[in-house]
Amino acid sequence: MSAGAGVEDLLREQAPQVLGVLVRRFGDFAAAEDAVQEALIAAARHWPAEGVPANPRGWLIQTAVRKMTDQLRSDQARRRREDAAALAGPPAVDVTGQDDTLILLFMCCHPALTPASAIALTLRAVGGLTTAEIAKAFLVPEATMAQRISRAKQRIKASGVPFGMPEGEERAERLRSVLHVLYLVFNEGYASSTGTDLHRTELSGEAIRLARMMHATLPGDGEVTGLLALMLLTDARRPARTGPGGELIPLAGQDRARWDRELIAEGTALIAGALAQGVVGEYQVQAMIAAVHDEAASVGNTDWAQILTLYGLLERMTGNPMVALNRAIAAAMVHGPAAGLKLLEPLDGPLAGHYRLDAVRAHLFEMAGDTQAAMAHYRAAAARTTSIPEQQYLTTQAARLRAEAAQSGARPPA
């Protein structure tokens, strides 16, 4: 690893801790975030040439505090806040010395924010990504992403949320929001919903890093453990999900020798430990499903009956139509494609127009030997997805069936 890369990693690790100190002291999230960004820029400029200071956290805090003070002094409308800060006395190098990253993560994932705003703010304030990097990851203009982050900070300020770890029911509610945001970030990185790349490892990698941090802080929480296990067990398959040209390779066609066995072992151990606690949540069930897939030597050797049972449990827990969609696939593998197709019928309402419903129908019709219906649904799915690799895969499947039908002498549909 180069010295520059080492400094970059250190700054990303320290950024949320420093931001937490400033928010705790000054109470202004937006101004503190700006000051920390300036401190990080200063560190990135000086440390590679001059060396990392003995106390990098203290250096960043002092620099950010100076930047914050300069901001207060330059803004006459904040004169009262400056006076209050001056009366509080000069800050110690580390203030309390505690790591406020987790509190900051809870603040960024406040239920008052939309999922899109919470994701953007979390990646900026806790993940250390720049606004430009976040905008690029979600394929929106930088100005649009800057507005989204700004609105999120304004909403947090208007909510009057104190900087501190929530307690009781509020903590449980906020924790659900945090886990949901991390889950969404990971999913977008593992299976990008738009654009030319199937994976966005900067997003999935950041979600895993933050989930590890959550687990280190809350090791006894089964759902935190379950989410981390789910991410690791899923990300373990990533090396085999694309071909040389970046094309999508479905689960059935993947070279399982390329799966990351260390991640699988770690994820399996995590979920086993979480289940031993006796209370099972939705992320733990999803991790169990991922573990069953990862432990199978092939699609044919997969314990589909167990997966079907787990999806049934997960559907009862969540009522999520996407879970019902996956249960239909498992049912087809256990009881045949007709059973799976039957389970898809109630999803025409909640998943109307979603490409995955057409893609699953196409797969099940192909299993059932109905080539024409399979081709029609592959084409419909390809027309509806905004992911280029998925679109190319679905189009290729339709073309393959057409070619097979022509070779067999059957008349292909127009």
Image (spheres, grey):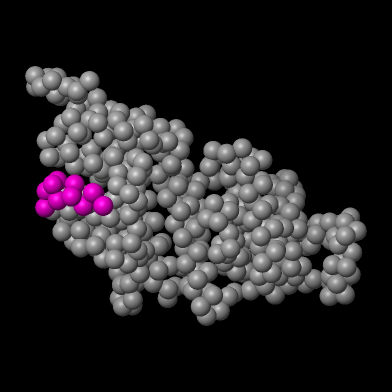
Q: Position of residue 259 (x, y in %)?
A: 30, 47
> Of 297 and 133, which appears nearest the observer?
133
Q: Is residue 12 left or right of residue 221?
A: right
Q: Residue visible at 51% across and 78% down?
A: 169
Give coordinates of residue 77: x percent, y percent. 88, 60
Q: Residue furthest left?
A: 409
**Where residue 180 sits: x, y (%)?**
46, 60
Range shown magenta: 335-346
Q: Quadrant of the C terminus?
A: top left
Residue 348 as seen in the image, left or right of residue 301: right
Say which residue appears at 70% left-offset and 64% top-offset: 158
66 lies left or right of 194: right
Q: Residue at x 30, y 69 (%)?
A: 272
Horizontally, residue 205 falls left or right of residue 71, namely left
**Residue 373 seen from this side:** yes
In the picture shown, does residue 329 fall above or below 101?
A: above
The question of residue 336 being in magenta is answered with yes
Q: Main secondary structure of the magenta part?
A: helix
Extreme-front residue of the structure: 349
Which picture quadrant has residue 355? top left
Q: Nearer the viewer, residue 161 or 353?
A: 353
Q: Position of residue 15 (x, y in %)?
A: 65, 58
Is residue 36 visible from the viewing direction of this image?
Answer: no
In the image as oriented, which residue stretches furthest toward the bottom? Answer: 168
Q: Residue at x 58, y 45 (%)?
A: 134
- Say whether residue 276 is magenta: no
